[in-house]
Image (tube, rainbow, N blue to C red):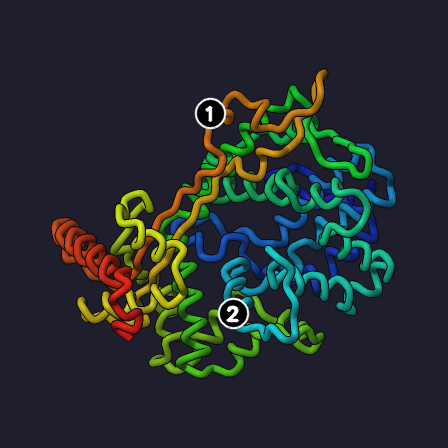
């Protein structure tokens, strides 16, 4: 392998590419990933978290090649699996996953069609792979179609898609290690070598699935725990949650209240390549700079100025779903209609004199880390078992449980620690009363509008 086709990576050591793969990496479509941070504004709490979708995609591509070799997948399909892993994030927009609910909200439903659980950036990824000129000259038309089909689970055996997107996919295997490294924490560490070498294929009469050998149960337990701890300690860190919500609120207000036309156009995917062409010019830094150039009195500019100066909203209310003893209140807060949070925000703003658009209600759900991994097949000397049956560690865990919290963010100001504790008690008591009031079926949900 030519030395010119290797790159040194802090997670995986040397990553090697074939010449045609290097050409794809050098394409304009792929190079834009250098300007999309992997963890949005997590660097406001973990200063080292400045890594991007670019190096993550290279890492996923590297692991995909290793797994394909481990499973002895043929060269033609291995090549497609490697390319699918390389391009799996090609459609992400500014601030990556933070953009997703905004795209879903403002993209015209009559022009795009989402399958259950499908995300808008996945549609955009597929269109870029199929139609982008910088990729068209590098990947055969038939291969671009096959890559999209593979990402959608419509090409070859199920194991092909599961390598790229599934309970044990290369996406998670790379981002857990990479995010842990750049955040400076140890929560996401697991034995990648052992996990890859423990992977195998489970075959039934019609299909093949990604599975793990019986001697890999312990490393799978380690992987699941790494995913859980990274979720609770990094991905759902309170500062990360607040900044994600502030970005979403700023963009939403920029579109709906400030009337910023270019912002609405950016988040209104219509399935056309004219949209894709413009979309691919945007990244985290350009969006931030452009919004900060808006009039300072606009909500979009003022909130992004807060983010730039790290003058963040405060979490004034944080409650576990089990702490809401009233069943009606719990249902409304976590599973109620969309028009419950806005009236609550209005009540909170009115009571404490905040701008109602700077009060944000946010339900936070932590799905069980073992929920998806529980049905991975474990292959041993006897018939295959599910991971939940083979693992002593997780057999005692109720895999259906969800950890749910409900939080409220607002521009609170504290004089000192004593004042903070006093205000927090007041926030708790008053907001609980407001939730119970709004949950009363006799109370109009228009209250506070």
Image coordinates of residue 270 in percent, x first then y, are 64, 75
Viewer-side residue, 74 vs 139: 74
Image coordinates of residue 348 in percent, x first then y, are 23, 65
> Which residue is label 1 attached to?
396
Element on which disc 2 rests:
helix
Farthest-out residue, top: 381
Image coordinates of residue 213 in percent, x first then y, are 69, 24
Closest to the camera, between mark 2 and mark 1, is: 1
Quarter where residue 275 is shown: bottom right
Q: Is residue 138 above or below residue 188?
A: below
Q: Assess whether mark 1 and mark 2 are in contact (beta carbons under 8 angstroms).
A: no
Give the mark count.
2
> Which residue is label 2 attached to?
105
Q: Quadrant of the N terminus?
A: top right
Q: What whole-number distance in Å separates the C-alpha atoms at marks 2 and 1?
A: 39 Å
Q: Confirm whether residue 355 shows in the render.
A: no
Q: Is residue 79 above or below residue 91?
A: above
| Other residues around mark 1 within 10 Å, as few (<14) / some (14–19) / many (≥20) | few
Quarter where residue 223 is shown: top right
Element on which disc 1 rests:
loop
Image coordinates of residue 6 in percent, x first then y, are 74, 44
Q: Confirm whether residue 331 shows in the render.
A: yes
- The disc placed on residue 414 is none
| Other residues around mark 2 within 10 Å, as few (<14) / some (14–19) / many (≥20) | few
Seen at 68% across and 53% down, the residue is: 88
Residue 319 lies left or right of residue 74; in this view the side is left
Q: Is residue 332 above or below residue 300?
A: above
Seen at 50% across and 32% down, the residue is: 225
Viewer-side residue, 146 vs 438: 438
- Mark 2 and mark 1 lie on one chain; the one further toward the N terminus is 2
């Amino acid at each position: 392998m030519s030395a010119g086709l290797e790159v040194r990576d802090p997670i995986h050591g040397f990553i090697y590419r074939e010449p045609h793969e290097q050409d794809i990496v050098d394409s304009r479509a792929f190079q834009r990933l250098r300007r999309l941070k992997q963890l949005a504004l997590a660097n406001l709490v973990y200063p080292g978290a400045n890594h991007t979708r670019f190096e993550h995609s290279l890492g996923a591509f590297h692991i995909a090649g290793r797994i394909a070799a481990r499973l002895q997948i043929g060269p033609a399909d291995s090549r497609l699996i490697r390319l699918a892993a390389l391009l799996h994030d090609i459609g992400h927009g500014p601030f990556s996953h933070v953009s997703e609910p905004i795209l879903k909200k403002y993209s015209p439903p009559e022009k795009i069609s989402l399958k259950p659980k499908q995300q808008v950036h996945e549609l955009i990824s597929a269109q870029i792979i199929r139609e982008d000129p910088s990729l068209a000259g590098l990947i055969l038309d038939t291969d671009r179609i096959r890559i999209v089909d593979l990402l959608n689970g419509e090409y070859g055996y199920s194991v092909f898609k599961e390598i790229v997107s599934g309970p044990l996919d290369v996406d998670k295997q790379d981002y857990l290690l990479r995010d842990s490294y750049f955040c400076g924490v140890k929560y996401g560490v697991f034995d990648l070598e052992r996990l890859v070498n423990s992977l195998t294929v489970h075959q039934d009469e019609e299909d093949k699935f990604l599975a793990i050998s019986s001697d890999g149960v312990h490393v799978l337990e380690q992987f699941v725990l790494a995913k859980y701890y990274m979720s609770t300690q990094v991905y759902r860190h309170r500062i990360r949650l607040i900044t994600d919500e502030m970005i979403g609120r700023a963009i939403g207000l920029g579109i709906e209240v400030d009337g910023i036309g270019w912002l609405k156009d950016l988040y209104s995917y219509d399935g056309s390549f004219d949209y894709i062409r413009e979309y691919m010019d945007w990244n985290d830094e350009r969006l931030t700079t452009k919004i900060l150039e808006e009039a300072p009195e606009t909500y979009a500019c003022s909130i992004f100025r807060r983010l730039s100066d790290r003058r963040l909203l405060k979490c004034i209310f944080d409650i576990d779903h089990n702490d809401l003893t009233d069943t009606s209140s719990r249902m409304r807060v976590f599973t109620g209609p969309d028009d419950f949070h806005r009236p609550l925000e209005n009540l909170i703003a009115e009571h404490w004199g905040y701008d109602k658009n700077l009060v944000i209600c946010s339900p936070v759900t932590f799905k069980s880390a073992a929920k998806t991994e529980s049905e991975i097949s474990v292959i041993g000397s006897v018939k295959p078992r599910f991971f939940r049956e083979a693992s002593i560690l997780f057999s005692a865990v109720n895999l259906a449980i969800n950890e749910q919290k409900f939080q409220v963010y607002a521009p609170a100001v504290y004089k000192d620690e004593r004042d903070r504790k006093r205000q927090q008690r007041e926030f708790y008591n008053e907001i609980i009363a407001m939730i119970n009031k709004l949950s009363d079926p006799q109370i109009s949900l228009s209250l506070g509008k």
